[in-house]
Image (spheres, rainbow, N blue to C red):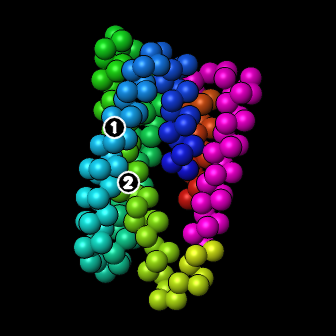
Amino acid sequence: MFQTLVTYLVYFYTDIYGLKTEHASLLILTAGLIAAFGFNPVIGALADRTNSRWGKFRPWILLTAIPLGIVALLAFSTPHFSYQGKVIYAVVTYTLLLLLCAASNLPYSALSGVITGDITPCSPLASRTILCQSCCCKFFFFLKRHPRFQAKQIKHRIIFFKAWIRRGQ
């Protein structure tokens, strides 16, 4: 799901929100590197050290779900700012989105390793999850070329929100 989100966000920033390609690319590269080398190790270490009555990883998934949804909707909103304001808004929302995605997806990915002590049933489960995520990404690539998908901004947000909700079911 994250791949689909980021892939569509590039299209959104350049074609809908009106950022220059070089600014959108620099934003995604810089924030991505910060997330990869900053957020992900810290979130992983914190999640691994979490001990609660709900387990290690469940609190992270539960507590980040609503903020992740709110920030995802904010990332796909188009406030009327000057160009510099749009860039700053995109930097803030995208950075928060990466932080919350890390805080939600890293513990979610680690669940398959702690469900059982036997790794045999966990490997196919993780493989199927990755396969389904890749298929969704390809589906969204196809959809973004469809004329109805390019109609209005609100439709983009609704389609994304429905896909995001379906992921949790």
> Does residue 156 appear left or right of residue 42 in this picture?
right
Q: Amino acid at mark 1?
A: Ala
How many circles with numbers are drawn on the protein? 2
Q: Which mark is residue 51?
A: none
Q: Is residue 142 above or below residue 103?
A: above
Residue at which label 2 appears = 102
Identified at 67% across, 21% down, the residue is: 151
User: Splitting the image into 4 quarters, where does residue 45 fall?
Assistant: bottom left
Depth check, mark 2 against mark 1: the one in front is 1
Q: Amino acid at mark 2?
A: Ala
Residue at which label 1 appears = 31
> Does residue 65 appear left or right of residue 88 in this picture?
right
> Does residue 24 appear left or right of residue 52 in this picture?
right
Magenta span includes 90: no
Magenta span includes 139: yes
Q: Which residues are magenta?
A: 125-154
Q: Is residue 160 above or below residue 108?
A: above
Q: Is residue 65 above or below residue 111?
A: above
